[in-house]
Image (cartoon, helix red, strand yellow):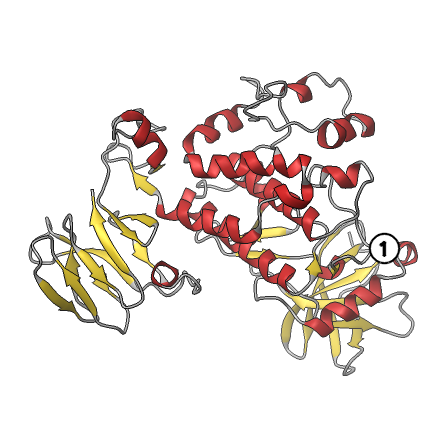
Amino acid sequence: MSDLLRAGQTVHTESSQTPCEVGQFLGGGGQGEVYQANLGGKPVALKWYYSHSIQADPYQRDRLESAIQSGSPSDRFLWPIDIVSEPGIEGFGYIMPLRELRYKGFVDLMKRRIQPDPTFRTLATSGFELANGFLKLHSKGLCYRDISFGNVFFDPKNGDILICDNDNVTINGDQEGGVMGTPRFIAPEIITDKARPSTQTDLYSLAVLLFYMLMIHHPLEGKRETEIKCLDAPAMNKLYGTDAVFIFDPNDNSNAPVPGHHDNALIFWKIYPQFLRDLFTKAFTNGIRDPQNGRIRESEWRGAMVNLRDSIIYCSHCGAENFYDPDVLKASGGKPNPCWSCQKEILLPPRIRIDRNITMLNYDTKLFPHHINANLFDFSQPVAEVTQNPQNPSIWGIKNLSSENWVCTTADNQVKNVEPGYSATIAVGTKINFGRAEGEIRL
């Protein structure tokens, strides 16, 4: 229940004295309360700080002013727009964009309160958006300090994300005030008092968030957790700090997941392809032992999440999403693992190799700008899609959705142009020159 402001009260922006009318109370946290508000006819969110929070952190206003001046790294951040205050009302607050109702909390994902369950494609997209968002923030010399699933929202249908609570963002290396992080997400070197929050510790928290999101489990909660009788502060300091051990550490099984206690981790870990498991293993082994050199960079996570999307294949029996894994094929002589859901044989669709990247050509596959130009990431504007021939449904093709002509060369060296709106037939050995890159269709 609201304790600070009342619906109908008016506060003003400090930069232009624009009136902001307080509306519905949305929720409260450790620092203050958040309300829906109206700023010049536009719905916004308003956060107002508790007086004790301001007294405990005298640098809060400075951080806000710095964030407002620097501007948002991208539209994925609910970034502070302006500071608001009012004579006669103690303290101050700030306004930010209002979160749309389609976005749900990652806490809801962890507790399986979202139905139907988000698809692997959605989760991979959210993972990409998170990595891309924090890459943009860090590239501005900023440190988020408190990456956790309490500060992130996602759209369960398409994977879009929003990052909130940006009033704690600081310049990287700033040691004055600010939060230290959220328990279970804080880097071990902060817990052991060997470091303060930085972009390096953000990378650790990001890895924890991605693991949580994909495995529905914490990367350090294994056998050792089950042996703890009271999860008090000293126990948490050991589990997540001084004695942190990855539950899938290939060289140390002292904290392995326990069946019946950690089933989410045991089930999901086997589903994902080896390249993703390798990244998580590095993040929570080398990344713990050597924070400066062993952490996975945002760009690496971004590439991994794109590859994860491209690796999706569908079980022809039950329709479940599975993953194409070249390491499994090498070990089994070309045979993929059975479907994780129904345990029946997986039939691999054709695939296209563009440079070093492989994309599975499912019935709903789309190619995006980054497939043919590595620097352009935009999942809203596909440049190609798999489609059926309307005269002969047994024939499938890749339809040109771009504005450029392609050149298609078949396995028997027949060459033709593929104009926008037309398709190149999916056939083994066919090569498609997209202009900036060339792809080859394989089985």
Residue 172 located left or right of residue 315: right
> Which image quarter holds the C terminus?
top left
- The x, y position of residue 174, in whole percent, is 80, 58
In this rendering, is residue 272 above or below 197? above
Residue 260 located left or right of residue 244: left
- Taking the view exactly as shown, the residue that stands out farthest to the bottom is 16
Quarter holding residue 232: top right
| Mark 1, other Cα within 10 Å: few <14 / some 14–19 / many ≥20 | some
Residue visible at 34% across and 43% down? 312
- The x, y position of residue 110, in whole percent, is 57, 37
Residue visible at 22% across and 53% down? 440
- The x, y position of residue 61, in whole percent, is 83, 66
In front of the other: 131 or 119: 131
In this rendering, is residue 60 above or below 183? below
Q: Which residue is mark 1?
A: 177
- The x, y position of residue 240, in whole percent, is 72, 32
